[in-house]
């Protein structure tokens, strides 16, 4: 089941039908029976006029980021490759062992990434910081979690990061991660009641002009932690209270296992394409 947020309404495809309907995004995502509801005869839904591929890709500004008022959070050092890269970039600042310790620890690294208005959708421009010299994309599986802490779907995230700022001092992580246009989500939400298999592949391709300047892939099997574990720590509910509440739900980026070489940095005009099947491809140009 695929769900896209557009300027004309919400598009849903359940494998046999493609329909468009008007509904408030936050309320929809937090339905207890979301998958069943989308497969049903939604009141007011009508067949999508025209071609789905043209609607989703032919008019870049038509498809919006799949987010309402949800916060975006992120998990760090969930892949061994990310652990190694973070240790290397921060060793001169004396923070190299921090990443090794969090990789092995029971508690994961979780941090705030973006408010909804800072998020860019498919084909929208992403940004790199002007005061950074080493900027990279981070292709990640993103979990769509409802207000009750249940994973209801998946999308693709690009956690654009300034590695030189974070490497200078780990305490600078918010400045390296949180700024306008530093997060992209899309193209839509893959709604399912089943977890994605560990064989699911995440791939990235970066094109500069006509040249592919970087590409790579990994699988969910390389993750140190399971998605459900990350969500449990993010919501952290006990029998008495919940440590953090998300009234509209949230989006949780699960970390990256693909790191460009140290000599690589994003440049204005680069096309970044991240693909996770069966979700699709998230494409953004660096402005």
Image (cartoon, rainbow, N blue to C red):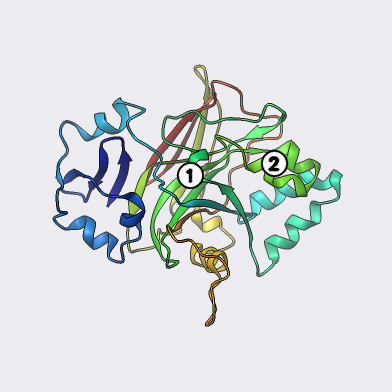
- Where residue 142 appears, x then y in whole percent? 47, 51
Q: Is residue 209 above or below residue 252?
A: above
Residue 14 marker = none
Establish if 221 lies above or below 243: above
Q: Is residue 147 visible?
A: yes
Q: Give the Cα separation between the discs numbered 2 and 1.
A: 17 Å
Q: Residue at x 52, y 39 (%)?
A: 118
In the image, residue 173 lies at what x, y percent? Answer: 71, 46
Q: Split into 4 quadrants, where in the image is the C terminus?
A: top right
| 117 to the left or right of 1 | right
Q: Which residue is mark 2?
A: 175
Q: Secondary structure at mark 2?
A: helix
Q: Quarter-wise, where is residue 187 in the image?
A: top left
| Residue 151 in the image, given as x and y percentages of width and height | 41, 62
- Residue in front for this viewpoint, 206 or 1: 1
Q: Which residue is mark 1?
A: 116
How dense is the environment of label 1, judged by Cα within 10 Å: few (below 14), some, or many (20 and up)? Answer: some
25 displayed left or right of 90: left
Check disc 1 and report its element: helix, strand or loop. helix
Indicate the position of residue 91 as horizontal and vertical percent values: 83, 47
Residue extending furthest bottom?
Answer: 239
Residue displayed at 65% across by 54% down? 77
């Amino acid at each position: 089941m695929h769900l896209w947020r557009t300027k004309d309404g919400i598009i849903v495809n359940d494998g046999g039908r493609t329909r468009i309907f008007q509904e408030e995004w936050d309320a929809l995502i937090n339905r207890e029976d979301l998958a069943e509801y989308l497969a049903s005869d939604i009141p007011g839904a009508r067949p999508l006029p025209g071609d789905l591929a043209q609607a989703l890709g032919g008019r870049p500004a038509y498809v919006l980021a799949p987010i309402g008022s949800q916060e975006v959070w992120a998990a760090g050092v969930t892949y061994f490759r990310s652990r190694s890269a973070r240790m290397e970039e921060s060793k001169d600042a004396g923070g190299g062992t921090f990443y090794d310790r969090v990789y092995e620890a029971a508690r994961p690294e979780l941090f705030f990434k973006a408010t909804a208005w800072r998020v860019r959708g498919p084909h929208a421009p992403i940004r790199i910081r002007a005061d950074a010299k080493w900027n990279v994309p981070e292709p990640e599986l993103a979990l769509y979690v409802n207000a009750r802490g249940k994973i209801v779907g998946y999308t693709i995230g690009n956690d654009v990061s300034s590695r030189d700022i974070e490497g200078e001092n780990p305490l600078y992580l918010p400045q390296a991660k949180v700024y306008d246009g530093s997060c992209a989500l899309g193209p839509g939400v893959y709604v399912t009641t089943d977890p994605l298999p560990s064989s699911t592949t995440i791939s990235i391709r970066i094109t500069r002009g006509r040249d592919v300047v970087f590409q790579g892939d990994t699988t969910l099997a390389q993750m140190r932690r399971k998605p459900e574990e990350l969500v449990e720590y993010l919501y952290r509910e006990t029998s008495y209270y919940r440590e953090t509440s998300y009234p509209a739900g949230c989006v949780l980026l699960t970390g990256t296992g693909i790191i460009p070489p140290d000599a690589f940095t994003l440049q204005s005009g680069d096309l970044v394409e991240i693909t996770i099947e069966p979700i699709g491809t998230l494409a953004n140009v660096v402005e």
